[in-house]
Amino acid sequence: MADNRSGRWGEERAARYLRLHGWHIEESNYSCRFGEIDLIASRRGILAFVEVKTRKDDSRGEAREFVTAAKRQRLRAAAACWLSEHESELQPRFDVVEIYAPRGIETKFPRITVIENAFE
C-alpha cells in the first residue's frame, strides 16, 4: 500500500482517530527542506510529531519497523524546523501510527495502533 492515495487515506484515518482521542491536529503534511511530518498534534502538554504508516498487513513486519534510522533523522530535523517557526511550551515527542487495512482504501474498519514516544 505504498501509493500516495493509500498514504493520504491512512493519514486521514490517523487524524480522525487522534481527534476522537482528544488530540488537536496542529498541522498535516508539514514540509520543509529537511523532510515531511505527516501530522503534528497536541494534547495535555504534549506536542506529537506523528509518522503514519499504512500497510495491508504485518506479514513483512510491523509498520513501525519501516520508520528507518534515516527516516527518524529526517523527522527530527523537520520537527526542529517546525519548532523554530512555531513557539511552543509543549513537550515534543515522536509517535508512530500504524494503520492496517487489508482491503486497502476500501477497508471499512482499519486496525489502528499508536506507538507513543516511538523514538527519541
Image (spheres, rainbow, N blue to C red):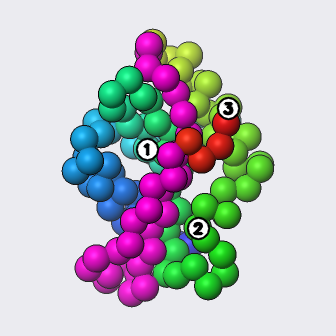
Examine the rendered structure and indicate whether residue 72 appears above or below residue 68: above
Do the CB atoms of the residues marked 1 and 3 lie less than 8 Å apart?
Answer: no
Measuring 77% from the left and 49% from the top, which residue is drawn there? 70
Horizontal arrangement in the rendering, residue 31 relative to residue 107 (left or right): right
Which numbered disc covers residue 63?
A: 2
Residue carrying label 1? 39
Q: CA distance from mark 3 to mark 2?
A: 22 Å
Earlier in the chain: of badge 2 and badge 1, it is: 1
Residue 90 in which image quadrant? top left
Q: CA distance from mark 2 to mark 1?
A: 16 Å
Measuring 42% from the left and 28% from the top, which residue is drawn there? 46
Check disc 1 and give the amino acid type: Leu
Q: Element type at marker 1?
A: strand
Examine the rendered structure and indicate whether residue 8 appears above or below residue 57: above
Q: Where are the magenta residues, as a range? A: 88-116
Do the CB atoms of the residues marked 3 and 2 lie less than 8 Å apart?
Answer: no
Examine the rendered structure and indicate whether residue 48 appears above or below residue 64: above
Q: Element type at marker 3?
A: helix
Measuring 60% from the left and 24% from the top, which residue is drawn there? 81
Q: Is the residue marked by circle 3 packed among few (<14), some (14-19), or many (20+) residues within 10 Å?
A: some
Measuring 61% from the left and 71% from the top, which residue is drawn there? 62
- As for residue 105 lying within the magenta part, the answer is yes
Q: Where is residue 21? Give x, y as percent.
A: 26, 47
Front tag of 2 and 1: 2
Residue 27 in which image quadrant? top left
Q: Where is residue 53? Give x, y as percent.
A: 53, 62
Q: Quadrant of the C terminus?
A: top right
Which numbered disc covers residue 77?
A: 3
Front tag of 3 and 2: 2
